[in-house]
Image: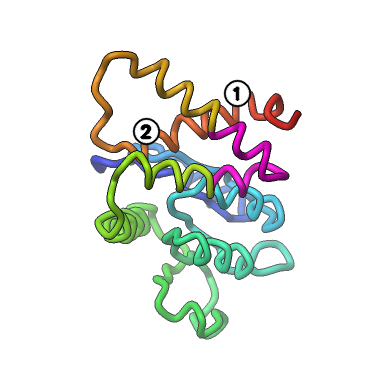
Amino acid sequence: MTDTSLRILVVEDDFLTAQRLTTEIRANGDHVVGPFADVHDAIHCVGLAQAAILDVRVQDETSFQVADSLIHGGVPFVFLTGYDRRHIPSRFSARSVFYKPSPAAPLLSNLHREYGLRADLQEDTVESAVIEMIHIARGLMPDKASAERLVEAALIRAIQEQGEGSVPPNVRGWLCHLLDREYKERGRIHLQ
């Protein structure tokens, strides 16, 4: 178990492997986004993820489009595959590849380390957290206005929950968690 819990996107079309990963990720104290057995479903939730585990071959497709989106968003990920590394394009050569069957522990260790390195490079301020929230919300909502309403509602929720108390040490994680809750509980009302 780690100090920081991450929202980990899981793209895996084998039901038993997906269930095992989900169980092990949650046992580690992290949250699962998915699991998804379809890359088109997964791509819509990339904005919710702080890290990802991608099966290379998902049904009749590859997860490379999801991987490209994760790179664009600065989200660390690993590949989990039964195929040889040569099936992975060279643009992903710097990414870690784990081979099936693999327990989740080494994957999670890698993802937490990569996320930690990324977080160390970014200042953990309210301003940087809000910028990240806007980026995530734009990936979730169909237009800029609804994304801004979603972020505004999450920030109002943060103010209400915090009241007179101090800001938690992990501002970014806390605010992104509130954004995720707002989206799941009331996302549709922000479409109007």
Give the residue at x 23% y 34%: 169
x then y, percent, for residue 5 = 34, 40
Depicted 141 relative to depicted 192: above or below: below
Residue 56: which quarter of the image?
bottom right
Which amino acid type corresponds to the residue marked 1 in the rendered image? Glu
- Disc 1: CA contacts within 10 A as few (<14), some (14-19) or many (>=20): few
3D distance between C-alphas at marks 2 and 1: 16 Å
Rendering quarter of residue 39: bottom right
Marker disc for residue 185: 1
Q: Please tell me which residue is depicted at 43% across the width and 71% down the height of the picture.
A: 97
Residue at 63%, 44% in the rendered image: 140
Q: Amino acid at mark 2?
A: Trp
Which stretch is magenta? Answer: 136-151
**Residue 72 screen position, x and y as percent:** 52, 65
**Residue 32 relative to residue 116: left or right:** right
Query: Which residue in the protein does label 2 denote?
Result: 174
Q: Is residue 12 left or right of residue 118?
A: right
Q: Secondary structure at mark 2?
A: helix
Question: As rendered, which of 135 and 76 lies closer to the eye?
Answer: 135
Q: Nearer the viewer, residue 81 or 189?
A: 189
For label 2, the crowd category at 10 Å Cα-Cα, with few meaning under 14, some 14 to 19 and many 20 or more, is some
